[in-house]
Image (spheres, helix red, strand yellow):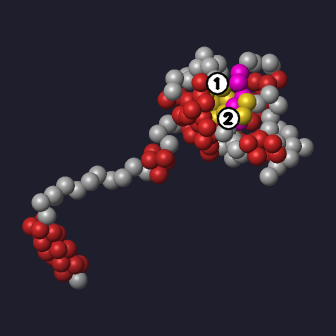
Amino acid sequence: MLKYVKQAFENIWNRFRKNSDDTYIPKAAPSAEEAILPIDPEEYTIYPYELKHKMDIGRDFILLDVRDDWEFQVVHLDGAVSIPLGELPRRFGELSPADEIVVYCHKGMRSLDAAYLLQQLGFKSTLSLVGGIDKWACEIDQDMQRY
């Protein structure tokens, strides 16, 4: 049975090759992770407990909130600068490439995109908060409002 299936496949393939000027067969597509995020997330992330430590020791950095304005109004981390992700490509000039920047959003996906964008624009010290403000509220500040 397998022999007949193989032969049928070869016949179809040979007919296709004869009818097609282009016999190029593409290589396998990249994985979803490679296709979506061309950086190693571990290099560009910071966990809530690490950010808390940075705050506690008084380390100088910019806290960038890339959520929408309404989300920022609901809850945000003290001292955060609000630049929604959609506005970041035209407002990145409000930030200094020399500063260390910690970016956060609701769950951590938009902030990874923002960190990657900033890296491409020459901001060398940019980190994304893993799990966003939601994980921060769960692990660091349980009194913080969640949505």
Residue 95 picture quarter: top right
Left/right placement of residue 145 relative to residue 4 reads right
**Residue 102, position as x, y percentages in the image:** 68, 29
Residue depicted at x 62% and y 45%:
109
Residue 119 % position (x, y): 53, 28
Which comes before the other along the chain, label 1 or label 2? Answer: 2
Q: Is residue 118 rendered to the left or right of residue 18?
A: right
64 magenta-colored: yes
Report the magenta residues as a range.
61-65
Mark number, residue 94: 1
Residue at the bottom extreme?
1
- Decide if residue 4 is on the left or right side of residue 100: left
Question: Is 119 drawn above or below residue 143 in the view shown?
Answer: above
Residue 42 seen in the figure: no
Q: Which residue is mark 2?
A: 83
On residue 59, the disc is: none
Callout 2: helix, strand or loop? loop
Residue ID at (59%, 24%): 93
59 versus 27 height, above or below: above
Q: Give how far across and how far down residue 36 sits, in percent.
A: 49, 47
Q: Nearer the viewer, residue 57 or 145?
A: 145
Q: How many numbered tags mark residues here?
A: 2
Mark 1 crowdedness (10 Å alpha carbons): few <14, some 14-19, many ≥20: few
Q: Main secondary structure of the magenta part?
A: strand
Q: In the rendered structure, which amino acid carries the disc numbered 2? A: Ile
Dots 1 and 2: beta carbons under 8 Å?
Answer: yes
Q: Most extreme residue toward the right, as rendered?
A: 143
- Residue sitting at 76 percent across and 30 percent down? 80
Q: Callout 2: few (<14), some (14-19), or many (20+) C-alpha neighbours within 10 Å?
A: many
Image quadrant of residue 8? bottom left
Examine the structure image and report whether residue 108 is included in the region drawn in magenta: no
**Residue visible at 80% across and 52% down?**
147
